[in-house]
Image (cartoon, rainbow, N blue to C red):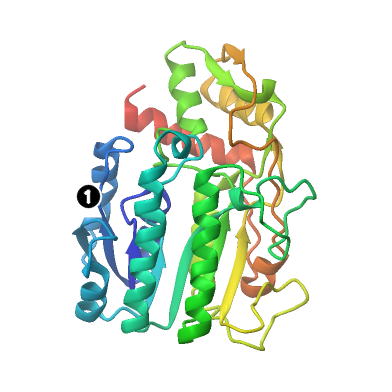
Amino acid sequence: MKVLVTGSAGFVGYHLSLRLLSAGHEVIGVDALTDYYDVALKKAREDRLSAHTGYKARRARIEAPGLLRGMLVEERPDMVVHLAAQAGVRYSIEAPATYMAANLQGTFALLEAVRAVPVRHLLIASTSSVYGANTQMPYKETDKADTPMSFYAATKKATEAMGHSYAHLYDIPMTFFRFFTVYGTWGRPDMAPSLFADAILRGEPIRVFNHGDMRRDFTYVEDLVEGIERLMEAIPKVGQPVGEADSLSPVAPHRIVNIGNAEPVQLLDFIGSLEATLGMEAEKVMMDMQPGDVPATWADTTLLRDLTGVAMGTPVPEGVAKFAEWFREYHGL
């Protein structure tokens, strides 16, 4: 296949593009390489992708007028995987306008482009943050998600609704996947694993929010992209649900799928795995909960298994060890 991947130099976009290239597919990548975090890391990811003959990169903002439609006309991809977004719960409190542009305007530009130039399947990244104030766990795709706790979550929930309207009006097969606390090699430096590892190795204290009383459904990135790859061929069709857990819309080829490890882990246990791997104990500064955050996440992955047969399989200690090895090598620590 030929696949257009937006956000191809990002954390998940890099891993997915690499997986598709390794499987023999062509990948057309588009990424703006914004300076929200270290651009050198994004360039390093892109350089590794560019070593593959099947990869073609475009540097641009997806919300630029006519950009995506032009790329679809020129490249005629079979599928599109939309991963480009402004990420981060806390940054959305500081700079909400960037989320309006990247997440809402960018997704709107993509929907308009695919309406004009259809593809077999449009897959779009969402987030577990849309579950917001829900307390019943594990989270199911059919649960209400009407209480976002951050503007980031609100923009992602809005894109799901925007996508449903286009899927219904224009018969565009569309799958949204809600990611759960992704970590792993080539991860973002603003995410907790990188912040923790950097501080521990430099002998500096780490901040532990909600006094450590946090549980997260930590999902190793290679498991995540395997799930995405398999979902590419699980094309939604109206009237053809795969079981009682299916979130398939009754009026549109539109589905939402959780991608998580289905096993929440205490934050202090995650930190403990990192300490054990690095051979160093962290100095912990206990902090109150941050605005926009939630105390726990937990994915029900029944639908993912029904659609793909995939069950996330990397235990946290194993995933943390792989991440730590990469982190030390990349940063020379």
Q: For the residue labelled by badge 1, is the local secondary structure a helix, a strand or a loop?
A: helix
Question: Which residue of the protein is positioned furthest toward the bottom in this rendering?
Answer: 239
Residue 183 appears in the rendering: yes
* Viewer-nearest residue: 222 or 32: 32
The residue tagged 1 is: 47
Horizontal side, residue 271 vs residue 159: left or right: right
Coordinates of residue 255 in the picture (x, y in percent): 59, 73
Horizontal side, residue 133 vs residue 218: left or right: right
Coordinates of residue 151 in the picture (x, y in percent): 51, 45
* Viewer-nearest residue: 29 or 109: 109
Residue 2 appears in the rendering: no
Residue drawn 71% across the image and 60% down it: 144
Residue drawn 29% across the image and 39% down it: 41
* Viewer-nearest residue: 291 or 247: 291
Residue drawn 41% across the image and 39% down it: 188
Compared to residue 330, the image places residue 109 above or below, namely: below
* Viewer-nearest residue: 97 or 12: 97
Coordinates of residue 247 in the picture (x, y in percent): 67, 72
- Number of marks in picture: 1
What kind of residue is marked 1? Asp
Residue drawn 45% across the image and 30% down it: 194
